[in-house]
Amino acid sequence: MSKIYVNKSPHLTGKVSCSGSKNAALPILAATILTKGKTTLYNIPCLSDTENMLYVLSELGGKCQRDNNAVYIDFTECKRHITPYESMSKFRGSFLLAAPLLARMGKARISMPGGCPIGLRPIDLHLKGFSALGADIKKGHGYVDLSCKKLVGNNIYLDFPSVGATENLIMAASLAEGETVIQNAAAEPEVCDLAEFLIKQGAKIDGAGSDTVRIYGTDSLTPCSYSIISDRIEAGTFMIAFAITSGKGEILNVNPHHLKPVSAKLSEMGAEIKENDNSIFIDATKTMTSSSIKTLPFPGFPTDMQAQFSSLMCETKGTGIIVETVFENRFLHIGELNRMGANIRIDGRSSVIEGGRKLTGADVTAFDLRGGAALVLAGLSAKGETRISGGHHILRGYENLCDKLSALGADIFMD
Ligand code: EPZ
């Protein structure tokens, strides 16, 4: 298992370029099943999650090739409708194969996605939507069996604006008969990127990025080439890296509109932020003060930035409160930060963080992707060496993280 070693690295400085978005790549890779032909995708990050997805796609019959961050996928033939358990249980995005297989093959056998440290991760909203489109659903032996001769459009109301359920249902509705309206849909940029990709292939989709998405099904989609958006959470993580080390620098290849809540919060805490067309400049050399955060679906404060902010708030002056409204168990990094000298109390879905602490390096464990990133950030500021076990979690969502941080002056390496 990979271990990451971080030493105190004050005043990170320089420019860092973001990779493609993991959470845009996974649904778009899955969506290539919908098209009989060769799709070309650019800006696909090389991560354990994307490599797992490419492996599963090839198991299903797709001919997949990678050339750095370009990926070529030919689904002229889709040979299987059953997904391999051992790969499916490795990453959450695997359930995004349900809709494309159901729409393409008329049936799908999908392994129930394993829960993960941040929560149970149920799929009831996905299944409610598939059922509304006419699919028969059977669950058993750790699998979900979906079948439907022809999907038929319908009105679907999501009890929660689930990103994955919105993405699955947009993919299923794209090849259904007639119109589908998804209400209380997720509006994340990654949902919009999937819609843009499908529209380029001939899908008829309106309203992606709002809470109501209308899809008018077509008989087939035409292969295309497409470049996915960059990773706003990676960009936000680098903003915190500059902030927690009182540094300054520029994050390149990012759409500032995707990070408004993060930039606004850092400005409120005392950082100087300058937004350009495709980059964000941050100067965090002045003293920063704590604030409070409540995570919400987009355009609210992103849950995927919550852990990273908790590391910063250990250092900034004053007491801050974080309320995590999206996942029920997303504080696993708190115990590890307290091992580094933080003083954080958890009360249900809230954590109270006493700031102004001088963190010290320690042996800590990453239990999930963003919690692991939070420990790396804390290690950049802590006195002495921080040794992070469970580094493989971090490899799931950050391409070349150690190299990118080292180029900014960080003392970090992975064994
Ligand atoms: C996506 O997960 C992202 N993953 C997550 O990023 C992100 O945190 C999350 O959206 C929220 O923005 C990918 O895109 C691969 P949800 P997803 O369905 O789709 C509940 C990261 O760190 N829910 O919006 O699984 C669920 O339990 C990862 O990159 C149901 O109750 O998230 C959770 O409490 C972590 N029933 C809430 O909705 C369902 O059927 C949000 O989940 C589906 C979800």
Image (cartoon, grey):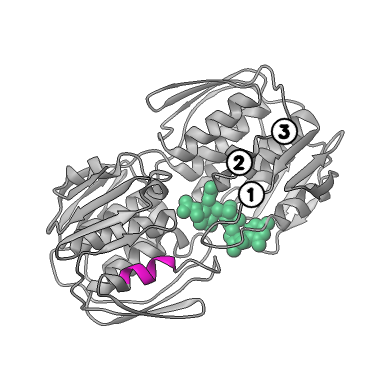
Could one spot residue 161 in this view of the protein?
Answer: no
Quadrant (top left, top right, bottom left, bottom right) of the C terminus:
top left
Q: Nearer the viewer, residue 273 or 98?
A: 98
Looking at the image, tell me whether mark 2 or mark 1 is earlier in sequence order.
Answer: 2
Ligand 1's quadrant is: bottom right
The residue sitting at 22% across, 79% down in the picture is 317
The residue sitting at 52% across, 35% down in the picture is 52
Left or right side of 8 for 203? right
User: Residue type at mark 2?
Assistant: Met
Stretch of the chain drawn in magenta = 332-337
Residue identifier under label 3: 82
* Residues at marks 2 and 3, CA–CA distance in whole angstroms: 11 Å
Give the percent coordinates (x, y) of residue 106: 81, 32
User: Residue type at mark 3?
Assistant: Ile
The residue sitting at 84% across, 43% down in the picture is 135
Using the image, determine if residue 301 lies above or below residue 34. Answer: below
What mark, if any, has residue 113 been given in the picture?
1
Using the image, determine if residue 18 lies above or below residue 281. Answer: above
Report crowding for label 1: few under 14, some 14 to 19, many 20 or more residues within 10 A (C-alpha).
many
Residue identifier under label 2: 88
Q: Nearer the viewer, residue 47 or 272?
A: 47
